[in-house]
Image (cartoon, rainbow, N blue to C red):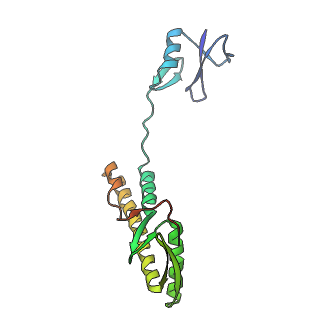
Amino acid sequence: MKYALFDENSNLQTCLIEGVHPIPASAVKVDDKLFIRLTQEADGIWRRVGDEIVKAPFPQVTPDYAQRVADERYEREDAVVSVEGLTVATSRDSAGMIYGAGISAILDPDYRCNFKTLEGFVEIGAQQILAIAKAVRAHVQACFDRELELLQAIEDGTYSDEMLKEGWPDSMPASPTSEPQ
């Protein structure tokens, strides 16, 4: 004898064979033909509806476009920009360090520091620090602005997958060895 066992939502949980498996009282006896279909046809969801066992299509899964856009923005945000001949990482860690140096530069126009670019350390002054902070902030903001445009296109129903790779600010991809200042 062959049986089908269904979960609390009436979805097929497993198939059982008497003498091989323990058969719970809630199991439903099925003939050989249906047993083969239950175990071989994986193109839908088998359900118990009343006294019948029917196959329903898989539910349509709508992609989470907003999450895809946010993920792409985050990836684009973590890049590299060139400012006054210096190559600077725009990752969140690096940007935080840069913004901190920018505050020091605002408070003290004579402020100088050893700043680590992707090529190595350079000594820079307050004006260069502020130029770097502005460039990094502009890059990051442009990424968020593009994300907003894409989210609006999703809302308007004009979004297409091709748009996800277009329209982002120009930058170089972040190097795997890029470090914050």
Q: Residue at x 37, y 62 (%)?
A: 146
Residue 104, quarter of picture:
bottom right
Residue 81 seen in render: yes
Q: Answer with the quarter of the image where residue 173 lies.
A: bottom left
Residue at 67% across / 16% down in the picture? 21
Q: Position of residue 3 (x, y in %)?
A: 60, 14
174 versus 10 height, above or below: below
Which x, y percent locates residue 6? 59, 23
| Foreground residue among 140 and 126 | 126
Q: Nearer the viewer, residue 92 or 159?
A: 92
Relative vertical location of residue 31 with respect to residue 105 in this rendering, above or below: above
Q: Quadrant of the N terminus?
A: top right
* Residue at point 37%, 65% (across, down): 171
Q: Nearer the viewer, residue 9 or 104?
A: 104
Using the rendered image of the protein, determine whether residue 160 is visible from the camera's viewpoint.
no
Point out residue 151 in the picture as x, y percentages from the top left corner: 38, 57
Q: Nearer the viewer, residue 181 or 32?
A: 181
Q: Is residue 25 left or right of residue 160?
A: right
